[in-house]
Image (cartoon, grey):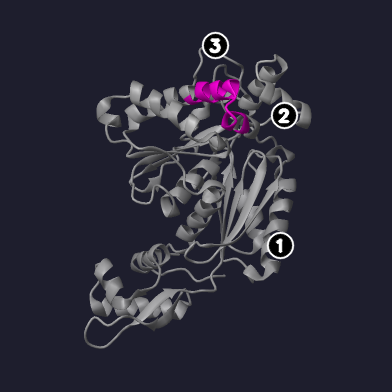
């Protein structure tokens, strides 16, 4: 098993090398508040652990040239993003660059045993491709609330059979490395924070619109999970009084009116009622419709598809407007499978938020699509486990 840093100074040095790449000792000294002698001691201790290695001579700053140090090129993290209808698995190096990435269609409803068999098979495929001898840690995202300290899903509405399943413990035994588990939206937020559109923002919201709808809340650079792990469960905020029944047992939830499943249902209804020749043709060809069909219809200029997206974007915008007035973020990121709906969706969300929230909160508020797309979750998962491995034992 990988050694862990012995103290907070070493943890800070590891995070710096992860986020900014190789540094000379002099550059490290510029960024951490340590005397030269204390810095030299901590770097030597990290070299002894094997977590960092010498990496050639640094550029001269006058006087004797120092060596660069970098994170060990042999470190490997596994990022796993389990969605409602798909699994993404990736291997990264210590700087969280993705070395290999696999995607597999699979329903989370098939239960934890079947899903984790698939995850382990995908991890083995990446390992056998020569990308890793083993893993130094794994981060796992699941589409429901997680009791974070134990790494256990709690009462997830769309995940029958998962309540209380010991995800962290089971996978740690199978993979032979530390494992951390979090909600998939929190990991998307961490991914965008590490390598995406939120790199320079300390307080932001990351809204994932997929089969369901959730929100990652980042405060002062850290994910806010709430007391029981259900912070940001905005799909179950009421958007339509006395509206449609929702999987959670209430009526009128945002998710019941605009998530991937609701959009597919509305699209099929429009096709059967003859309101959209484009959707009718797709339904006849495939026997069912998805959000991707609505996106394709909108791109082809189909008025019904555009209306469905605008209506959903307006409802989502109403909920986000309330969050913006309450939280006053510096950025709102929109991601997830439904972002194939792109700028039509974004325009509807923006219009509603800017109309409804106070000008003081929205005067300088960017509302943007995520940059990382399908790798946001696995990047965030690798970030989560690296934070753990690079923290003092």
Q: Is residue 346 visible?
A: yes
Q: Nearer the viewer, mark 2 or mark 3?
A: 2
Q: Is residue 372 magenta?
A: no
Q: Is residue 301 magenta?
A: yes
Q: Residue at x 51, y 12 (%)?
A: 241
Q: Is residue 181 visible?
A: no
Q: Is residue 153 above or below residue 250?
A: below
Q: Is residue 392 above or below residue 246?
A: below
Residue 325 percent across, percent down from the top left: 33, 27
Q: Residue at x 37, y 79 (%)?
A: 68
Residue corresponding to mark 2: 282
Q: Kindly state the secondary structure of the residue where label 2 is placed.
A: helix
Residue nearer the viewer, 66 or 276: 276
Residue nearer the viewer, 247 or 263: 263
Residue corresponding to mark 3: 242
Can you tell which quarter of the image residue 260 is in?
A: top right
Residue corresponding to mark 1: 125
Q: Residue at x 26, y 26 (%)?
A: 359
Residue nearer the viewer, 255 or 41: 255
Residue 30 percent across, percent down from the top left: 25, 70
Q: CA distance from mark 2 to mark 3?
A: 32 Å
**Label 3 Cα neighbours within 10 Å, binned few <14 / some 14-19 / many ≥20:** few
Q: Nearer the viewer, mark 3 or mark 1?
A: 1
Q: Kindly state the secondary structure of the residue where label 1 is placed.
A: helix
Give the extent of the magenta segment: 296-313
| Placement of the N terminus among the 4 image quadrants | bottom right
Q: CA distance from mark 3 to mark 1?
A: 48 Å
């Amino acid at each position: 098993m990988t050694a862990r840093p012995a103290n907070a100074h070493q943890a800070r040095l590891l995070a710096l090398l992860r986020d900014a790449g190789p540094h000379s000792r002099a550059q490290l000294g510029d960024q951490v508040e340590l005397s030269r002698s204390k810095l030299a001691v901590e770097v030597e201790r990290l070299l002894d652990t094997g977590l960092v290695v010498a990496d050639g001579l640094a550029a001269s700053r006058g006087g004797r040239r120092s060596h660069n140090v970098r994170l060990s090129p042999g470190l490997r993290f596994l990022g796993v993003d389990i969605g409602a209808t798909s699994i993404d698995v990736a291997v990264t190096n210590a700087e969280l660059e993705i070395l290999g990435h696999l995607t597999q269609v699979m329903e989370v409803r098939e239960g934890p045993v079947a899903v984790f068999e698939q995850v382990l098979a995908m991890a083995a495929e990446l390992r056998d491709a020569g990308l890793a001898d083993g893993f130094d840690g794994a981060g796992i995202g699941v589409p429901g609330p997680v009791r974070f300290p134990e790494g256990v899903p709690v009462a997830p509405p769309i995940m029958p059979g998962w309540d209380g399943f010991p995800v962290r413990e089971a996978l740690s035994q199978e993979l032979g490395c530390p494992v951390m588990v979090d909600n998939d939206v929190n990991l998307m937020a961490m991914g965008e924070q590490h390598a995406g559109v939120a790199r320079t923002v300390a307080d932001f919201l990351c809204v994932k619109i997929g089969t369901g709808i959730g929100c990652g809340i980042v405060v002062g650079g850290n994910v806010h999970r709430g007391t029981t792990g259900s912070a940001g469960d905005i799909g179950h905020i009421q958007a339509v009084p006395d509206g449609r029944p929702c999987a959670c047992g209430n009526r009128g939830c945002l998710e019941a009116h605009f998530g991937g499943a609701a959009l597919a249902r509305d699209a099929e209804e429009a096709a059967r009622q003859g309101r959209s020749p484009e959707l009718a043709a797709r339904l006849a060809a495939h026997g069912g419709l998805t959000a991707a069909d609505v996106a394709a219809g909108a791109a082809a200029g189909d008025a019904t598809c555009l209306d469905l997206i605008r209506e959903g974007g307006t409802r989502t915008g109403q909920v986000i407007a309330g969050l913006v007035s309450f939280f006053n973020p510096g950025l709102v990121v929109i991601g997830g499978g439904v972002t194939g709906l792109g700028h039509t969706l974004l325009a509807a969300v923006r219009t509603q938020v800017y109309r409804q929230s106070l000008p003081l909160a929205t005067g300088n508020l960017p509302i943007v699509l995520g940059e990382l797309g399908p790798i946001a979750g696995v990047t965030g998962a690798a970030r989560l486990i690296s934070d753990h491995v690079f923290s003092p034992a």
